[in-house]
Amino acid sequence: MDLEKLEELDKTDAPHRSAPPPDDHHQPSAHEQERERFRRSRKRRHTWTAALCTLLALAVVATAAVASPGWERVRSLFLDGAEFRDAFPELLRAFWLNIQMFLVAEVLILVLGLLIALVRTSRAPGLQPLRLAATVYVDVFRGVPTLLLVFLIGFGLPALRLQGTPSDPWVLGVIALVLSYSAYVGEVLRAGLNSVHPAQRNAARALGLNERQTMRHVVLPQAVRNVLPPLLNDFIALQKDTALVAVLGPLEVLRAAQIKADYDFNYTPYLGAALLFIAVTIPLTRFADRLQRRAARRTWAEATR
């Protein structure tokens, strides 16, 4: 009898025991509001302190440079405004070739690097020769300096006189960059594939996916997401290393700056070329930093659940 009465009371009281009020009705306490004001004040103070310290450091460096005995000669050779305005349009046109080489090489590197990573992470016995070849490829091309590889491909490949061998210097330079950076990107992607927990594969297979579908829809998206920041760092380095192709003679930005500097013995065009590279690499660097922070926050959130 008591049990039945208790159940009846629970049913009667159920409509009155509604869910807690939504967050928009929540009123923080005075102590919490005070803590939030303190945090905002501290953040503003830290921001102003960092900005002032940065400006002070820049002022000290600028003062030391201007006060140095050779400042006038450095300014005339590297910071000539008239020379910069005269050379910049030509440098900008030449920089377009660097952008083209970067875009073409990036696509080829992603494809070749992914193939290397897939081969090296496979466990099929029949792929052992390919795994051995991929390992040798990575060991060799990561060990050879990129500049030396540009020389070897740029001058050695045409010397073979094989039918169909490209003759354009920028094409040979792109081949050298692809061979070099595919080894690095392949290792980055392999680390991403190995970072995916085996339980993800097992769960996908349990849902009825075959090995190819599991790799495409489950493993690869997680692997790429895990290694996206270091992958972007490699491509930032690739963008800068397109200047190494200048040793083969194509009129890219570094070669154009060198020709202009040799013509009137003023090195300001080199500064213009550097500024063009900085204009591309800094946004990519900030984007990579943002991805790293987002990945760190996601990892922290998953660890604290």
Image (cartoon, helix red, strand yellow):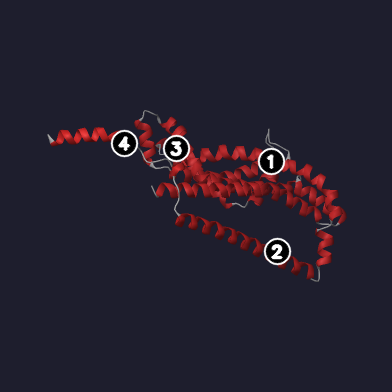
Say whether marks 1 and 4 touch (CB < 8 Å): no
Tell me which amino acid carries mark 4. His
Q: Earlier in the sequence, mark 3 or mark 4?
A: 4
Q: Which residue: 60% across, 37% down?
A: 108
Q: Nearer the viewer, residue 298 or 150?
A: 298
Find the distance from the CA under tag 1 to the CA under tag 2.
35 Å
Image coordinates of residue 53 in percent, x first then y, are 65, 65
The circle drawn on residue 101 is 1
Mark in the foreground, 1 or 4: 4
Tell me which amino acid carries mark 2. Leu
* Residue extending farthest top: 208
Find the distance from the CA under tag 2 to the CA under tag 4.
66 Å
Decide if residue 249 is on the left or right side of residue 42.
right
Asked if one can make out residue 158 in the rendered structure from this viewpoint, the answer is no
Q: Earlier in the sequence, mark 1 or mark 3?
A: 1
Image coordinates of residue 61 in percent, x first then y, are 72, 66
Q: Secondary structure at mark 2?
A: helix
Say whether marks 2 and 4 touch (CB < 8 Å): no
Decide if residue 255 is on the left or right side of residue 14.
right
Tell me which amino acid carries mark 1. Met
Find the distance from the CA under tag 1 to the CA under tag 3.
30 Å
Identify the residue position indicated by label 2 in the image. Answer: 58
Mark in the foreground, 3 or 4: 4
Identify the residue position indicated by label 4 in the image. Answer: 16
Say whether marks 1 and 2 touch (CB < 8 Å): no
Find the distance from the CA under tag 3 to the CA under tag 4.
48 Å
Tell me which amino acid carries mark 3. Val
Q: Which residue: 43% across, 48% down?
A: 301
Identify the residue position indicated by label 3 in the image. Answer: 219
Mark in the foreground, 1 or 2: 2
Q: Earlier in the sequence, mark 1 or mark 2?
A: 2
Mark in the foreground, 3 or 2: 2
